[in-house]
Amino acid sequence: MAYKIVSSQCTACAACESVCPNVAIFPKSGVYAIDPVKCTECIGHHDEAQCVIDCPADCIVIDKNVPRYAA
Ligand code: SF4
Ligand code: SF4
C-alpha cells in the first residue's frame, strides 16, 4: 500500500483501471478509487506505478496515511 486518487481532480477517464496488475482500481461515487489493501505500488510487476504513468490528470499520489508496501 498504497497510492490514492485525488478524487477532486479525477476526470473518471478510466485509463488507470485496466493497467493495474492487482485490479485495485474501481469506480466509486462518479470517479475512481484505489483499494489500499490491493495496491502493491506495482512492486513485483513493474518498475513504476502504472496508474501514475497513465493518468492524464496527474491525480494519483502516494497515500502518506498508510505504510509503504514491502514485498
Ligand atoms: S500503483 Fe500499481 S498496484 Fe497500485 S493502484 Fe496503481 S497500478 Fe495498481
Ligand atoms: S486515470 Fe486518473 S483521471 Fe482517469 S480515472 Fe484514473 S485517476 Fe481518474
Image (spheres, rainbow, N blue to C red):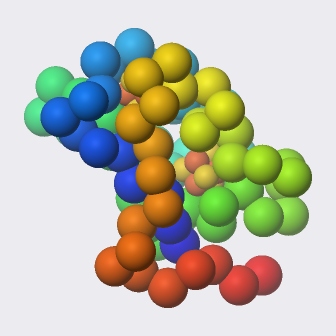
x then y, percent, for residue 23 = 56, 46
Query: Which residue lies at the image location 62% right of the left edge and 25% below the top edge?
Result: 54
Q: Is residue 26 visible?
A: no
Residue extending farthest left: 29
Query: Which residue lies at the image location 36% right of the left edge and 45% below the top edge?
Result: 5
Q: How many marks?
A: 0
Quarter where residue 25 is shown: top left
User: Does residue 33 lie above or below 4 as drawn?
Assistant: above
x then y, percent, for residue 33 = 33, 44
User: Does residue 19 lie above or below 71 as drawn?
Assistant: above
Apparent side of residue 42 relative to residue 47 in the rendered image (left or right): left
Apparent side of residue 57 relative to residue 42 in the rendered image (left or right): left
Query: Which residue lies at the image location 48% right of the left edge and 61% below the top edge?
Result: 62
Q: Is residue 30 visible?
A: yes
x then y, percent, for residue 71 = 78, 81
Quarter where residue 39 is shown: bottom right
User: Does residue 58 lie above or below 68 as drawn?
Assistant: above
x then y, percent, for residue 17 = 51, 31
Quarter where residue 29 is shown: top left
Apparent side of residue 19 relative to residue 26 in the rendered image (left or right): right
